[in-house]
Amino acid sequence: MTGGLRGAAAVVGVAESDLGEVGPDRYAVDLAAQAAAEALGEAGLTTRDVDGLFCAIAGRGMAPLDVAEYLGVRPRYTDGTMVGGSSFVSHLHHAALAIAAGACEVALIVYGSTARSDSGRGRLAMGPPELPSYEAAYRPRMPITGYALAAARHMHEYGTTRADLAEVAVAARRWAMLNPKAFARDPLTVEDVLAARVVSSPLSTLDCCLVTDGGGAVVVTSAARARDLPLPPVYLLGAGEAHRHRSISQMPDLTVTAATESSARAYAMAGVGPADIDVVQLYDAFTINTVMFLEDLGFCAKGEGGAFVSGGRIAPGGDLPVNTNGGGLSYCHPGMYGIFTIIEATRQLRGEAGERQRPGAELALAHGNGGQFSSQVTAILGTERTL
């Protein structure tokens, strides 16, 4: 089935809900529904057209049932895969497989979270991660402790510096300043990041993603049907998934993620390589993520990520536009970020990104991360010219 998957399905609608801090009277399923209505609207479809539902919401074990009930959708195919923040890039892959197999024709991928508002009303949107006893004994502050561990190892092995990591945060902020929907738009410098309070050495508060509310939705259908809908289709050309561990203490190598495997599968299916990609959307829960993913996705050699991101290379005006919406570091991060990589990749390929638009973008990479560098999912998206 995967051999014939290239270009068989297309994204035909994307949308965010209200973002930032939505207040005490809004809930995760409400934001998911708001995003779904907008995404279906721009696709020229309604909930009556949806026969495939793909959904994950932290803390809701039967999220697809909740969302389907709320939307009034009666899907004939449902996928509640929950592998953390990479779930939605995984859903995109699974939706294309389901459409190609005839299991559904119009797939809705949807997410919602009130992580920020929940913290304000004394309720956690996501409970503390389950830890094996041999980790819990050290009282780690998860998830940041796990990412700090990987960052410290990368610095030790390859000479990566805190200033290198700070360049990631600054680039994300510079993109966010071009995005009216971004939560954090104040100017940011490398010196600001280095002077910020260290939360888990070597990571400071400004090395960490935001905590916001927000929802997102992506509508996927067959290539044949997509051509009759209002907006230019954005085709799924390749996808790959991989995971090697759940707990950070079981990660085989703290400086290498399973993105090496997921991306190899996606590139092979799409018939392209890193040098062909015009825009990159990564799950940047922490600054170290961007450095390691650029290495593991093949944009630079292992150990060269720190130097690669320096000098504004991934910022506006740089050689490789990365996280052009501002990413999880400055745009939004409502607990799980993966769906927003697809949304921004789609907008770039449709030429809808305004001031942050990469001229002539034809190929985009969207990459999701779940757990603590655990689940890795890569998708390659392209315009009709890339088929």
Image (tube, grey):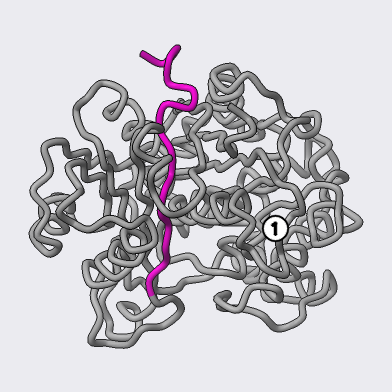
Where residue 281 appears, x then y in whole percent?
Answer: 61, 49
- SS state under label 1: loop
User: Quarter-wise, where is residue 128 in the image?
Assistant: bottom left
Q: Nearer the viewer, residue 149 or 93?
A: 93
Residue range in magenta is 1-17
Taking 17 as reference, is 43 above or below it? above
Where residue 39 appears, x then y in whole percent?
Answer: 36, 60
Residue, x 64% and y 56% (percent of image)? 351
What amino acid is labelled 1 in the image?
A: Pro
Taking 73 as reference, is 92 above or below it? above
Q: Along the horizontal axis of the image, is 26 left or right of 174?
A: left
Q: Quadrant of the C terminus?
A: top right
Count the numbered circles shown.
1
Taking 247 as reference, is 209 above or below it? below
Q: Pointer 1: what residue? A: 202
User: Quarter-wise, where is residue 296 in the image?
Assistant: top right
Q: Along the horizontal axis of the image, is 10 left or right of 355?
A: left
The answer to whether residue 4 is magenta is yes
The answer to whether residue 146 is magenta is no
Taking 155 as reference, is 215 above or below it? below
Q: Badge 1, how many Cα within 10 Å: few under 14, some, many 20+?
A: some
User: Is residue 139 at least partly visible in the picture?
Assistant: no
Where residue 151 appears, x then y in whole percent?
Answer: 68, 47
Where residue 263 appears, x then y in whole percent?
Answer: 58, 27
